[in-house]
Amino acid sequence: MKMRPGVEVAGLSDVGCQRDNNEDSYAYWEPEDDAIFQRLGRLAIVADGMGGTEGGQHASRIAVETLLESYQVADSADDPQQRLINAFADANASVHHQAQENPALRGMGTTLTAIALVANRLYFAHVGDSRLYLLQAGELRRLTHDHSLVARLVENGIVRPEDAEKHPQKHVLTAAVGVTDAVQPDVPDEPLSLERGDILLLCTDGLWGQMTDSEIVGLLSSKAPMAACRALVDLAKAHGGPDNITVQVAKIV
Ligand code: CA
């Protein structure tokens, strides 16, 4: 794949310390064609599958592959944000269809978080409890909202934020791709403008659930993207690594 200057990107996925299989998937894409690159930019995706012994890994892989394909389809929308929304609908339909067709995969679903970087504009779409962070001028901002039961309980004041991590139902999602016949991703009101030095982090809960924001800031700001991915995964594992861990880091250079 052609990798152009302007953004340094790295990704890493690890099964973690306690699981036998990795149900996370991720992908990065840049078009070969420069004219298409001007319009569609770069795409980075993470997904965290769930459902049975087989379903989880299938769901995340199908969702990532379908999203990648659909985002590139020539007759989709001109606007990258609408293109992402259309691609999420296709990914949802694809996972849902296969879950209906195959009894072993019934009930499978996946989180799905995707960014499109077109020139200096950031578009994204998100379902589930994987996360997108922006480190800008030393400040870490989370750009996505967790679609989880515990996040809802915290918002409603029923669970204290400091207790959310240990909540027995912290893995229960309130929205996922492929579980029903339609999905509505969260999207920004308008694209964000990025500047040189900005760092984006896409990750599954196996990463963010195992470390503090200040640990994330420390590693992201002191290391190049590939080294940061390695260090983030290593730290999540040093903290127990109970879940699969997937990260993608993109730095505007
Ligand atoms: Ca997970």
Image: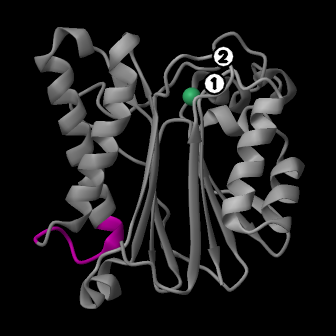
Q: Quadrant of the C terminus?
A: bottom right
Residue 23 in view in this figure: yes
49 sits to left or right of 92: right
- In which image quadrant can residue 32 be found? bottom left
Q: Nearer the viewer, mark 2 or mark 1?
A: 2
Q: Residue at x 38, y 78 (%)?
A: 2
- Helix, strand or loop for the magenta stretch, by majority: loop
Labelled disc at residue 18: 2
Q: Quadrant of the N terminus?
A: bottom left
Pointer 2 or 1: first along the chain: 2
Ligand 1 has an atom within 8 Å of the beta carbon of the residue at disc 1? yes
Whether residue 247 is in magenta: the answer is: no
Please name the residue that numbered disc 1 is placed on: 243
Give, as a single range, the part of the protein colored magenta.
Answer: 75-82
Q: Quick one: label 1, few (<14), some, or many (20+) residues within 10 Å?
A: many
Q: Secondary structure at mark 2?
A: loop
